[in-house]
Image: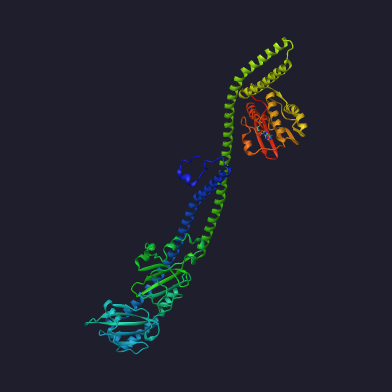
């Protein structure tokens, strides 16, 4: 068989040319079934896997986006609350340090009265001081005696002069209490230079604000300065006044197995590809974040869990607000989605494998059956054409031999006539015997040529009504003597209801006689022959002739209908019996089949139509 599509033939290797070799052929069928199975499996599983992978990826994106959006909203709220609060503090300090109040504030009593009022509103204000244009402290209300302290060398002092306002990061200083400073500078109205109002505020005020916005939905929320030093007390990731351990590093070594069940890590494209990814771009459309200096990342904590980390710079302050949230990816929704997806995928694969297995074995069986039928028809056609050509040859030979045979017969008859007319002479009797021998042989030759001619032309069919059971008994009667002699019992299992058929009596006799004869030969001595008749349907009957003879090999079975095929010794068999029977049955609209096993026996199954044109 040739496959035109080369690629397909490569995918589905078909059968070799050795169709006659059953072992090779079976191997070819098995190969074909296997290749078909693999091909179909790949065709089905590829889209299935791609779809599952995509939905896994999409759902994960969706979850991440959702939780990021949530986090963004949280942090925006928190950020604006703190920014508003810090700006309010600044306004208060600005208001207290109005430009025209310098002289008034130098007065300790007035400053004290003002500070007391301030503390009533903001108990976390720790101290207040006024610094003149030379950087010297002029007036101070608070727990420490710092009058006369020179600030000129300090960085904050330069900064407040330059920018008008200054907010420090949280530090402990010699107070040993975390605090921060807000300072404003004002130009003297009547002379050169600027004076400065500096307020120290307890760091707890920030802590309280952060605490109020902290929710259980986030793992941690805290403030840091530009060096990542905690300005408020983080819940999990560090200590107030110390550098926070959790930060955006250059690169993180990522171990996917800590996040997902190993079986599904295969689909975890994003995690495997981009380990520590910056999500800021994904959220650039998020208005609040776009305008701010925000960093959004997925980080790995020391405990090995993944967290979403958002860091927003707070406007006009030295601080950043940081919110940390455990990745939703660890949550139940994600876990169950993966579990469901895994089970759906797994069951689809199992079902696909079973169905494809069934399909591929089914198709292979279908092809095998088709091949078998085709082979059978080919063999039949081959033997029919062989029969036809041998028939023609035999007819030619028989025809040619018939003429000289007639002459021999005629001349022998003539010699016989002369013998009768002639009186006795020496050796007359012997010569008469020889003459009889010649005539007998001529007769035998005529029977053979007649058979050969019949084989070729199959002589005309003489249709008559036949009771098949009676016909079978008649045939057996011919051979009864020989069978009894060889201790062969011939039994019948005849169906009384079997229909009479319309066919050629003498040709059918020839067929059955030949088959029973072969059965007797195959048994030799001691055995049994069973003839049975039955009805297949309204139009067909079946005759079975079974013997307990030597049986036939598969090879012999294939050739028994070939003309001149015989396994009998020379002189005993002609090899024409079954081929003629085959031809006759075909002509009468019937069929003949053989089943045989060496050492067990043989059964010939014949079907005949009830009527035949
Ligand atoms: P012949 O009988 O002259 O050999 P046939 O055409 O009738 O020719 O038979 C062909 C061959 O088929 C036989 O030589 C024999 O080998 C085989 N054969 C036929 N019938 C039987 C049978 N009942 N049991 C075993 N072999 C058989």
Q: Quadrant of residue 401?
A: top right
Say which residue appears at 71% left-offset and 26% top-offset.
Answer: 500
Q: Quadrant of residue 517?
A: top right
Say which residue appears at 72% left-offset and 35% top-offset.
Answer: 523
Q: As drawn, which residue projects farthest toward the left?
A: 191
Locate residue 157 relative to residue 7 in the image: left or right: left
Q: Is residue 391 above or below residue 13?
A: above
Residues 95 and 59: in front is 59
Q: Report ligand 1 position as a quadrant.
A: top right
Residues 400 and 429: in front is 429
Residues 335 and 495: in front is 495
Q: How many marks?
A: 0
Q: Is residue 109 above or below residue 221?
A: below
Q: Quadrant of residue 142?
A: bottom left
Q: Position of residue 4 (x, y in %)?
A: 46, 40
Q: Is residue 153 above or below residue 556?
A: below
Q: Position of residue 230 (x, y in %)?
A: 40, 77
Residue 539 visible, this orientation: no
Q: Is residue 110 above or below residue 432?
A: below
The colour scheme used to paint the residues is rainbow
Say which residue appears at 64% left-offset and 18% top-offset.
Answer: 405
Q: Position of residue 539 (x, y in %)?
A: 67, 29
Residue 449 visible, this orientation: yes
Residues 196 and 429: in front is 429
Locate residue 214 relative to residue 395 in the image: left or right: left
Q: Position of residue 600 (x, y in %)?
A: 70, 40
Q: Which quarter of the figure is the C terminus placed in?
A: top right
Locate residue 26 relative to residue 51 in the image: left or right: right
């Amino acid at each position: 068989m040739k496959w035109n599509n080369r690629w397909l033939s490569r995918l589905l290797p078909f059968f070799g040319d050795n169709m006659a070799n059953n072992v090779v052929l079976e191997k070819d069928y098995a190969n074909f079934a296997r290749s078909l199975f693999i091909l179909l499996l790949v065709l089905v599983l590829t889209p299935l896997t791609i779809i599952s992978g995509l939905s896994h990826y999409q759902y994960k994106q969706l979850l991440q986006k959702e939780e990021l959006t949530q986090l963004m909203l949280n942090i925006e709220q928190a950020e604006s609350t703190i920014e508003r609060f810090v700006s309010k503090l600044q306004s208060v300090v600005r208001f207290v340090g109005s430009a025209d109040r310098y002289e008034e504030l130098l007065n300790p009593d007035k400053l004290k009265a003002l500070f007391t009022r301030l503390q009533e509103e903001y108990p976390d204000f720790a101290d207040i001081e006024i610094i003149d244009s030379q950087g010297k402290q002029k007036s101070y209300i608070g727990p420490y005696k710092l009058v006369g302290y020179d600030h000129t060398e300090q960085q904050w002092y330069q900064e407040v002069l330059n920018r008008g306002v200054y907010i420090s990061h949280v530090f402990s200083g010699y107070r040993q209490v975390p605090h921060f400073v807000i300072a404003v500078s004002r130009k003297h109205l009547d002379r050169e230079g600027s004076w400065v109002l500096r307020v120290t505020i307890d760091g707890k005020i920030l802590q309280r604000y952060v605490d109020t916005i902290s929710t259980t939905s986030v793992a941690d929320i805290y403030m840091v300065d530009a060096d990542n030093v905690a300005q408020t007390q983080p819940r999990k990731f560090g200590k107030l006044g110390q550098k926070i351990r959790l930060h955006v590093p250059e690169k993180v070594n990522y171990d996917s197995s800590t996040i997902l069940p190993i079986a599904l890590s295969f689909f975890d494209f994003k995690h495997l590809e981009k380990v520590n990814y910056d999500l800021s771009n994904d959220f650039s459309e998020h208005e609040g974040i776009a305008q701010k200096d925000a960093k959004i990342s997925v980080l790995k904590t020391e405990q090995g869990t993944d967290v979403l980390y958002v860091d927003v710079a707070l406007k006009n302050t030295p601080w950043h607000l940081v919110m940390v949230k455990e990745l939703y990816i660890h949550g139940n929704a994600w876990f169950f989605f993966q579990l469901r997806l895994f089970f759906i995928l797994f069951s689809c694969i199992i079902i696909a494998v079973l169905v494809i297995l069934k399909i591929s074995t089914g198709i292979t069986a279908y092809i095998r059956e088709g091949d078998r039928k085709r082979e059978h028809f080919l063999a039949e056609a081959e033997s029919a054409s062989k029969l036809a050509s041998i028939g023609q040859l035999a007819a030619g030979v028989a025809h040619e031999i018939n003429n000289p045979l007639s002459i021999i017969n005629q001349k022998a008859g003539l010699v016989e006539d002369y013998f009768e007319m002639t009186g006795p002479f020496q050796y007359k009797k012997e010569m008469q015997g020889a003459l009889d021998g010649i005539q007998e042989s001529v007769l035998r030759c005529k029977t053979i040529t007649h058979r050969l001619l019949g084989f070729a032309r199959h002589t005309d069919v003489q249709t008559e009504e036949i009771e098949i059971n009676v016909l079978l008994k008649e045939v057996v009667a011919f051979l009864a003597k020989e069978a009894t002699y060889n201790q062969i019992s011939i039994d019948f299992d005849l169906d009384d209801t079997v229909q009479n058929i319309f066919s050629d009596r003498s040709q059918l006799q020839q067929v059955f006689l030949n088959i029973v004869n072969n059965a007797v030969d195959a048994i030799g001595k001691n055995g049994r022959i069973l003839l049975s008749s039955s009805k297949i349907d309204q139009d067909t009957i079946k005759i079975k002739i079974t013997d307990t003879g030597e049986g036939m090999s598969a090879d012999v079975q294939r050739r028994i209908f070939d003309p001149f095929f015989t396994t009998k010794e020379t002189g005993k068999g002609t090899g024409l019996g079954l081929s003629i029977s085959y031809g006759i049955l075909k002509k009468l609209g019937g069929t003949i089949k053989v089943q045989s096993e060496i050492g067990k026996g043989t059964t010939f199954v014949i079907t005949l139509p009830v009527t035949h044109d």
